[in-house]
Amino acid sequence: MAEKRTSYKKLSEELTSRLKEKEKELAELKDRYLRLAAEWENFKKRTEKRMGEVLETANQELVSQLLPILDDLRRASNSKGKGLKRGVSLIYNNLNSLLEREGLKEIEAEGKKFDPLYHQALLHTENSQVPADWVAQELEKGYTFRGRLLRPAKVAVSKGGK
């Protein structure tokens, strides 16, 4: 009987020892998990802050490039007579060039086959000069920006001729 008690005691000590090891391992894993979670939160905060700074810098750069055009508009609004039309035309060309350099591109519409991805049909028209389902008239320009649709071209689509 004493032999059984010794083996139970030995087994109990071994199980207690293994339990303590597992508890220690669990505590280490829990600590590691908490550290990783804190690091992840800090990473997210740093990334959000950096993104905000990048956007602010990009907006600041664009606005600074628009300032000369704003100056031109002020001069044009103060001018009188035939110089006004020429001034507005120059301003339009400057602004258009700036936006093209930044990635803005006009969508070709008039005389093209109607494409619902890039054209928004506002009306249908009978036109013997333009085949059916082709754009007969561009009502408002459409644009892509760096390859992504910004605004579809608003168009009149031909029904074909009679």
Image: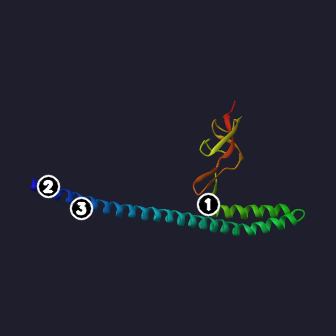
Callout 2 crowding tier (Cα within 10 Å): few <14, some 14–19, many ≥20: few
Q: Amino acid at mark 1?
A: Gly
Disc number for residue 36: none
Q: Amino acid at mark 2?
A: Arg
Q: Which residue is mark 1?
A: 103
Please state which amino acid type lies under the numbered disc 3. Answer: Ser
**Which residue, as the protein is rendered here, is positioned at the far top?**
162
Mark 2 residue element:
helix
The tag on residue 5 is: 2
Residue at horizontal 60 percent and vertical 41 percent from the top: 116
Percent of width and height locating residue 127: 70, 36
- What is the distance, in whole Å, between disc 1 and disc 3 at their CAs? 68 Å
Figure quadrant of residue 53: bottom right
Q: Residue at x 75, y 61 (%)?
A: 92
Q: Nearer the viewer, residue 161 or 37?
A: 37
Q: How many numbered markers are drawn?
A: 3
User: Going from the N terminus, do you reach mark 2 or mark 1 first?
Assistant: 2
Q: Residue 93: image x %, image y %? A: 73, 62
Q: What residue would you read off at disc 3? A: 17
Q: Is residue 114 above or below residue 69?
A: above
Question: Which quadrant is the C terminus positioned in?
Answer: top right
Q: Nearer the viewer, residue 23 or 100?
A: 23
| Disc nearest the viewer among 2 and 1 | 2
